[in-house]
Amino acid sequence: MKSLQIDRTGAVFIGVWSSGYIGGSLATSAIAPLAANLWRFAIGGILLAGIARRRREAWPRGRALGAAALVGALLFTVQFGGLYLGMANGTPASTTALIACSAPLIVAAAGAALGWDRLAARQWIGIGLGVAGVAVTLADRLGRPPTATAFAWTLLGLAGLASGTLLQGRLRTGAGPAALAATEIAFATLAMAAWAPLEGSLAVPGTPRAIGSLLWIALIPGVLGPLLLFALIKQRGATRASSLLFVVPAVTAIAAWPILGTPIGPTTVAGLLVAAVGLRLTLQTPDRPRRRLEQATPPADARSSSLVPHPDRREVPHPDRREVPHPDRREAA
């Protein structure tokens, strides 16, 4: 039952994350790119803070607060600021998706190099298939090569996504998920508020397209996206959680057909199948050794109680183990 819940969480995350590309495409066609991000962060952060307050969640403090500020700046400000500016400077949306959804490869390589994550050979094959699936999905959609400036912005967004995801997996705090997400987005909003005025107007036109797309990216990927991502990172680790991004381009392409009028071709279906195989290898391979390790390792309470007795655990003789005096002792008595 637990694995079924994780599968559903991953499926919802893929849908939510994919909708962010559709909504973002609509929003940036009506609002300045960084302004769309600024108002998205502001609305989403307020809603997440309200959820955390209603749930009475603990908030990050001390070092965890500083770490949350760093993760928020990377995962939200740098990622979306870089990707949106890259598209504004000429990088096609399909190319942007291709680069961004290759982040799991960087997360896996960096985690392995730092000793934070160990991957089996089959997992590396799965990651490679995931990247290949992304490339196949977008093979017939890649536009002209971007300029050096646009490409640099897109790579900056990729760096923000990969580094933010990697550090999020190392963040240890007792804060609740909504409180942590609200804190990170609050710092991202402050950083974006200083950056956005330098890149265009902050005004939001009063058109249905602008308001509707802004509300969508603020409520769906802006609120649900971070909560689902953080939950998946906590359950699976940064590498396996980010590997869900391999399927996002194909799902985005399918959703863009009725919404944006962009037809899909056989390469989209082929890419989805390849990415699905890679995702299966990446997610399911490590589960078996983990279960064997848990079965072979005694619980923490058992290990500690075998070394130091608990003060409340006084030794009481078993009723069937009453001390019987030796026959010689009875005669002596």
Image (spheres, rainbow, N blue to C red):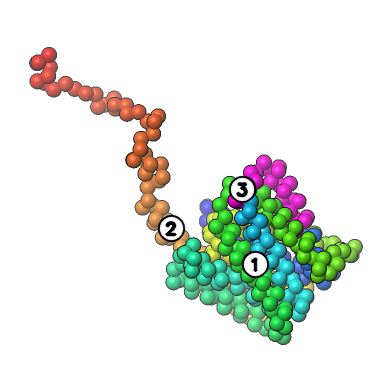
Q: Main secondary structure of the magenta part?
A: helix
- Cα separation between marks 2 and 3: 33 Å
Query: Which residue is label 3 attached to?
Result: 62
Q: Are marks 2 and 3 in contact (CB under 8 Å)?
A: no
- Tell me the SS state at disc 1: helix
Query: Which residue is label 1 attached to?
Result: 160
Outermost residue toward the bottom in this view: 144
**x and y percent of residue 140 in the render?**
67, 83
Outermost residue toward the right in this view: 206
Kind of residue indicated by mark 2: Arg
User: Viewed as shown, does residue 270 lie left or right of 202?
Assistant: left
Query: Which residue is label 2 attached to?
Result: 290
Kind of residue indicated by mark 1: Gly
Q: Are marks 1 and 2 in contact (CB under 8 Å)?
A: no
**Labels 2, 3: front one:** 3
- Tell me the SS state at disc 3: loop
Residue placed at 64% from the left, 59% from the top?
Answer: 70
Q: Is residue 225 above or below residue 327?
A: below
Please say whether residue 269 is one of the residues in the magenta stretch: no
Ranked by sequence position, the earlier of labels 1 and 2 is 1
Ranked by sequence position, the earlier of labels 2 and 3 is 3
Towards the viewer: 289 or 28: 28
Kind of residue indicated by mark 3: Gly
**x and y percent of residue 203 in the render?**
87, 64
Q: Which mark is residue 177?
A: none
- Tell me the SS state at disc 2: helix
Outermost residue toward the top in this view: 333
Q: Quadrant of residue 102?
A: bottom right
User: Viewed as shown, does residue 206 lie left or right of 264?
Assistant: right
**Quarter of the image that includes the C terminus:** top left
User: Viewed as shown, does residue 146 lie left or right of 3?
Assistant: right
